[in-house]
């Protein structure tokens, strides 16, 4: 193709193009970042994809006030789970959900667990109460038990020992941070060397 052919082709392609009447750009409205935007951004940073549309307030399988809550992900060692069940790990943080609405409780559980993860806190207790007088009975307990199984960072959960609140509370073990995993690997390598 010669230069003249290129020019003819270009003019043919641009034949329908019209000149713009003005040369000023429209300025877009500046959006202010609100507390709500910041909270959503923070939640998106700390929650995995599975948790974005999580923790429904619409439905939860109902359990009884005295039922024991027990949940363990695959890969959690039996010895670790047994120690959690027996309340032998020191409790590093506590969340009390008494007198909270379900919506407030859900938000507080997520916020509490995010903060614990940031601070490398692994063993916590969440007091939900038995809900013997709620209608339906054990509503908060049922929702908390259901939510905890949906959060990827929760490794295992078990109803507390009597001295920590019994079936009105749950022990929760969170995943280990990458830094703690590395520390453990290094510690165990020194033992075997």
Image: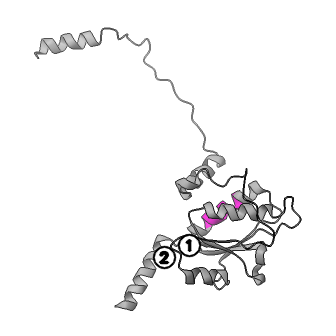
From which residue to which does the magenta span run? 107-115
Q: Residue 132 sits in which quadrant?
A: bottom right
Badge count: 2
- According to the picture, the residue beneath numbered tag 2 turns out to be 180
Report the residue at 37% width, 90% height from top: 192
Tell me where residue 31 sits by quadrant: top right
Q: Is residue 189 within the magenta segment? A: no
Q: Which residue is mark 1?
A: 120
Q: Secondary structure at mark 1?
A: loop
Residue at image position (68%, 52%) is 56
Q: Earlier in the sequence, mark 2 or mark 1?
A: 1
Q: x%, y% of residue 124?
A: 66, 74
Figure check: 27 above or below 181 = above
Dots 2, 1 in contact, CB < 8 A? yes
Residue 111 in magenta? yes
Determine whether, in the image, residue 160 is placed left or right of residue 137. Answer: left
């Amino acid at each position: 193709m010669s230069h003249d052919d290129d020019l003819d082709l270009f003019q043919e392609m641009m034949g329908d193009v019209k000149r713009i009447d003005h040369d000023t750009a429209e300025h877009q409205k500046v959006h202010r970042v609100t507390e709500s935007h910041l909270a959503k951004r923070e939640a998106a940073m700390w929650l995995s994809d599975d948790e974005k549309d999580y923790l429904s307030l619409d439905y939860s399988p109902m359990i009884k006030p005295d039922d024991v809550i027990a949940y363990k992900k695959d890969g959690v060692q039996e010895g670790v789970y047994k120690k959690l069940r027996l309340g032998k790990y020191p409790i590093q943080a506590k969340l009390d959900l008494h007198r909270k609405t379900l919506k407030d409780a859900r938000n507080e559980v997520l916020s509490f667990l995010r903060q614990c993860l940031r601070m490398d806190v692994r063993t916590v207790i969440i007091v939900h109460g038995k809900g013997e007088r709620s209608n339906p009975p054990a509503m908060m307990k049922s929702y908390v038990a259901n939510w905890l199984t949906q959060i990827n960072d929760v490794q295992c959960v078990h109803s507390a020992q009597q001295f920590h609140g019994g079936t009105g509370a749950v022990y929760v073990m969170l995943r280990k941070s990458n830094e703690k995993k590395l520390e453990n690997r290094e510690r165990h390598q020194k033992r075997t060397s």
